[in-house]
Amino acid sequence: MRVKTGLEKMLEQGLYRDKVIGLITNHTGLDSSLRQNFDAMIDEGYRIRALFSPEHGIRGNAAEGAKVGDETEPRTGIPVYSLYGESRIPSAESLEKIDVLVFDIQDIGARYYTYPSTMLGGMRAAAQANIPFVVLDRPNPIGGEMVEGNVPSPDDLSFVCYAPVAIRHGMTLGEIALMEADRLGLPAPHVVKAEGWERRMFYDDTGIGPWVPPSPAASTQDMALLYPGTCLLEGTNLSEGRGTSSPFELVGAPYVDPHVLAETLLKANLPGVMVRPTYFTPWYWKHVGKVCGGVQFHVVDKRAVRPVELGIRLLFTVRDLFPGFALREHLPEEPAKKEKKPGEPGTEQAGSQGDFIRKDKPRDYLDLLAGGPGLREALMNGSSPNDLISRWREEASEFERKRKPYLLYR
């Protein structure tokens, strides 16, 4: 049976057709025939007064971290308010004369993604405006059974670490909205469930349709599955594969011997993947134009892959094998701290070698991704990954218990 998304259920039942709607969405808000949600809604007689766009913009074409401005949707003439520009929550003015604020975006299933942060900002704004908030739910594309990774404290939350959830949380955005509304004391949203989705299902089990990259680098379903682990490389001088045809599947750096790395990772018996030594030359982000040695992870058993543990073992392996390993000095969108002349280190494109510092003086970008200092401290003090993996497994198990009251699917 094909899964029906929350969008399709809303259209089928005519929910909120008599209301003036504000819609938080992007290019992933599609029905089974790949029709854009606001087009489908207008065709069914819905009145949409405002659109709101997350990171990457309404069309999904803006680069990661790039600010997005307000615009007008050219075919419909509907104003589009950016939630990844000067403000990250809908303004009171943008919600004037709106009866209900609706959210419809495909998530990727990892805590680093910013779309859930945008959703929570919308929930807060709707509560302040005293209007209902509706989530048109969609499946978690990497399944709802497996939970991995640590759970940050409330003090460690940020836009890339939006809630006390595990890195691979195994929840839909509707479930997260219910859980966070409870934690934050917000009105409970109305979640229009995805009919037919079960927790054992990955995206390609749903029959919804082809994979549409939810962000520019989310090129394949394998990328989505590996992302909860390989995204941690963003906090280091290892390339996570941005600027290649296989981001987050290809990883490496100019200082890496691909055969040594692959041989060592093979001994680790990483479940569900094959590891291939390779070379690549990024055209964007880190190490632009430089030949990088590294590996490509090929998913051969999606149900066996443990991406968070894969990412941890990868980081510790590179730390132990290659002296060139270091952590990021600052966030990708921040300017380098020091002005430099053209051609000197640090003047390259964001993410290049100039953004990194010595191993013994780490900064906190990895902390933002990892939801606290635990991973960075373990990397820097020479610890084995096993203690960290064991501790994160315990946190994931505790989170599984805490999430149970909010689960909508079996």
Image (cartoon, rainbow, N blue to C red):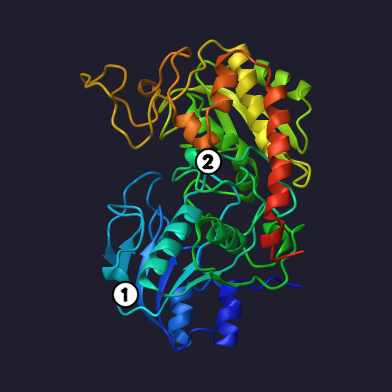
Q: Is residue 261 left or right of residue 338?
A: right
The structure residue drawn at horizontal position 30% and vertical position 64%, both measured from the top left corner, is 91
Q: Is residue 314 left or right of residue 188?
A: right
Percent x, y for residue 139?
64, 62
Q: Which residue is mark 2?
A: 245
Distance in Å between CA atoms under marks 1 and 2: 34 Å
The structure residue drawn at horizontal position 76% and vertical position 73%, both measured from the top left corner, is 1
Secondary structure at badge 2 equals loop
Q: Which residue is mark 1?
A: 78
**Camera-side residue of 147 and 243:** 147
**Camera-side residue of 355 and 273:** 355
Q: Amino acid at mark 1?
A: Ile
The structure residue drawn at horizontal position 47% and vertical position 12%, both measured from the top left corner, is 360
In which quadrant is the C terminus drawn?
bottom right
Q: Amino acid at mark 2?
A: Ser
Percent x, y for residue 320?
62, 13
For residue 26, say whether it is visible: no
The structure residue drawn at horizontal position 68% and vertical position 17%, both measured from the top left corner, is 384
Q: Is residue 193 left or right of residue 99?
A: right
